[in-house]
Amino acid sequence: MAATDLTISVNRTDNTVVCYSPLMITTNGVWQGDNPLEYSLPLFIMQLTLIVVTTRALVFILKPLRQPRVISEILGGIILGPSVLGNIRTFAKEIFPLRSVMVLETMANVGLLYFLFLVGVEMDLSVIWRTGRKALSVAIGGMVLPFLVGCSFSFLLHHSGNERTFLLFLGVALSITAFPVLARILAELKLLSTELGRIAMSAALINDICAWALLALAIALAENHASSLASFWVIVSSVVFVLFCLFVVRPGINWLISRTPEGENFSEFSIGLILTGVMVAGFIADAIGTHSVFGAFVFGLIIPNGPLGATLIEKLEDFVSGLLLPLFFAISGLKTNIGAISGGATWAILFVVIILGCAGKICGTLLVAFFYRMPLIEGVTLGLLMNTKGLVEMIVLNVGRDQKVLDDESFAIMVIVALVMTGMITPVVTAIYKPARRFVPYKRRTIQKGKLDGELRMLACIHTPRNVPAIINLLEASNPTKKSPIYVYTLHLVELTGRASAMLIVHNTRKLGKPAVNRTQAQSDHIINALENYEQHANCVSIQPLTAISPYSTMHEDICNLAEDKRAAFIIVPFHKQQTVDGGMEATNPQFRMVNQNVLANAPCSVGILVDKGLSATARVSACQISHHIAMLFFGGPDDREALSYAWRMSEHPGISLTVMRFIPGEHVVEPSMESSTSTGNNDPRIPTIVTDTEKEKKVDDEYLSEFRFRTSGDESIVYVEKVVNNAEETVAAIRSIDNIHDLFIVGRGQGMISPLTAGLTEWSECPELGTIGDMLASSDFAATVSVLVVQQYVGMGQMDGLGTPDSPGDAGDHFGNMYQMNRRSTQLPRGQGVFTS
């Protein structure tokens, strides 16, 4: 290597002379005898690949512990750094040599620049003005005490530099709450939509804005040789920069948006101008003495909410947060040398800082909680959540280290403090905070209990746009009238992806016709268009479309909470299988089967699973021209009564004919008795019996069917048939004998019912969530063009809740006794569905 090709630089960390070769960018290839790791571009690619693979592996390993991604990214850097693999001399020399630090840090800061721009775009500053005093008090209380703890801690460490700046950096680092990381943790814990989650998010947003102001102040004071006058000019110029962005740049961006016709994409020139503006803002912020990311963040804040912000997020987020941002956290880990923490006394200080830092946040939040009379456990949980650390703290620590405010020991201590404090939040909050399930005491939780002249509230879940036609046809067949209108809440179920910042987007009501920014939104637009078109042409139907984005494992919570909030009486969920062209049934997404099972176990109202085998193919016509032939199979029990109630309502539609077939056991059939319940060896009176009281149930069935027959006796469109059968074979034969003119079967799920008429069929059941009969009807070897609706009735939570529900004994005129409620719940206990346990 010629001496003329070398550029000599001094590394600021160790004062080591490092030689750079401007010409050694790309290699000529291994066949020319070159080592790719001696050239900057192949070396950077190798480093980036190693960092991304390591962090992704750690994300996968820590996923069962529900840790945020920032933990994996910092840990990945620590593993690759001098604390672990960096101790191997060959690895450190070949993979992370000192000459590569400049390129690596430059790219890491470029990624950081654009990520902070995206964070600013996703933040909604109007939340601050809408924030109540409680969230503002939590934010202030959660900053003051930790800041004082950080200031006190600074005196425990030996530091030879500017004591005032050192004190400020440590105080800021401990008092920060990471808004993006907290959003992801709250989403994981399903607390984002709760009152506690809303207070935490609002307080964290205020905390984050204050942290940026403190960071700008800390950077202004960080230069050891700077005069107080220079620091003053840094602060003044930063304020001027913010005002310039707010009153000059923002109107210019609004003008740029106004020039884009509504419904069209933004031009490449506009997007390029915005992305260039990010770099210009970063350059100005760096030139005036603050960090470049401060300029990018402020520039992101002035981008108006709407299609421009959504377009920028869609174009940048995956690349920046998935590839470039891990570089910054990895750099922080590479700078962390745990070996620099020497001596038992220093380790003791580390543990004291962790304990006092957490205690400071918790105590500060608790004081506010006591003032507003919040429960103790909520105050502690809120304090723990406010301990979330992340990007801003790492920026503070890195700036402090670069400015020599923090030495290697202090830097390593604070990185470990951030890791421990953030890592313990999810497990600790999960262990100590069990939010009581909010139970809304509304009465119309079933169709059977609804008034004939009252409204019917329904929640219809949609997996894909393919489910929409069947849902619409079912709604139209539900006979909406002026006396009994139908209010439908449609919920498009979307899986939550792993992007942490996706939870920060404020979803304003988007005007239809504008282009969708991603596939999910395109599907939602298609669904909303179809539903709104139906609503415009339908009578007495009101539709409110919504979208739920959550993991499959907790998707049922969104469904059940929404049903309870909206006081729905009936939830419709599509079956997880769809019909193929050859008439078979194929699972489109097996995860939705788990969602349906969880909804059945936890629903606050009745549930129907719709198996579409041709209902969606029916061309939608006007309400007066609709024509359906429905068959309702009645075996007995609450689910069958609920199914009959829904079929009864549908039969009042002039275009619908209904056949009700009741199956009656023959003389030689032995009915299950209460004595059989003791054969299980269960003699504990506190544990409810598994077998229902058959005689009592049969009496309720007879009464309800008598009422149905009496009220519909003059209706020629309704046919009532009784079939006497002795076993499962005769039951199947009777069902197959039904005329093939029907296009919909309605059956009860039969959960908790033991019937000799279906004995033996359970062994062949593929999908127990449909019940014995529903599973048979939905199978591919049954009628290929007859859809199935399997109904489960809500039977209440009984005395376990202490609330009077429509199906509890306290309700006058109730058909279901307390014994039956206990029996019904007990049948679900063996399946591990914990909502029914006391």
Image (cartoon, rainbow, N blue to C red):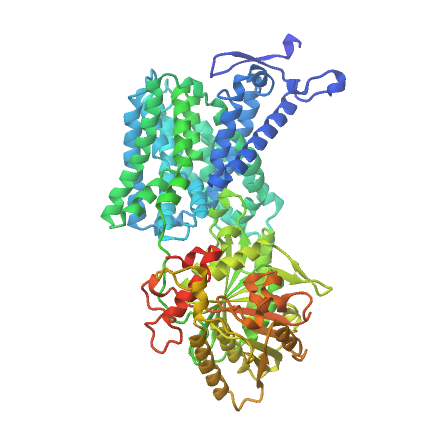
Image coordinates of residue 558 in percent, x first then y, are: 46, 56
Quarter of the image for residue 269 reads top right
The quarter of the rendered structure image containing the C terminus is bottom left
Asked whether 826 or 383 is in front, the reply is 826
- Identified at 62% across, 81% down, the residue is 625
Asked whether 51 or 437 is in front, the reply is 437
Q: Does residue 767 lie above or below 392 as drawn?
A: below
Image coordinates of residue 837 in percent, x first then y, are: 40, 57
- Residue farthest toward the bottom in the current orientation of the protein: 714
Image coordinates of residue 74 in percent, x first then y, are: 48, 30
Q: Does residue 589 lie above or below 280 as drawn?
A: below
Whether residue 393 is visible: yes
- Residue farthest toward the right in the current orientation of the protein: 31
Q: Does residue 98 lie above or below 323 as drawn?
A: above
Q: Does residue 92 lie above or below 188 as drawn?
A: above
Asked whether 810 or 340 is in front, the reply is 810
The quarter of the rendered structure image containing the N terminus is top right
- Specify whether 603 is left or right of 51: left
Quarter of the image for residue 448 reads bottom left
Image coordinates of residue 703 in percent, x first then y, are: 44, 82
- Residue farthest toward the left in the current orientation of the protein: 371
- Identified at 63% across, 27% down, the residue is 45
- Specify whether 245 is left or right of 769: left
Whether residue 510 is visible: no
- Identified at 32% across, 41% down, the residue is 383
- Specify whether 547 is left or right of 385: right
Across the whole image, how many numbered discs are drawn on residues? 0
Asked whether 525 or 274 is in front, the reply is 525
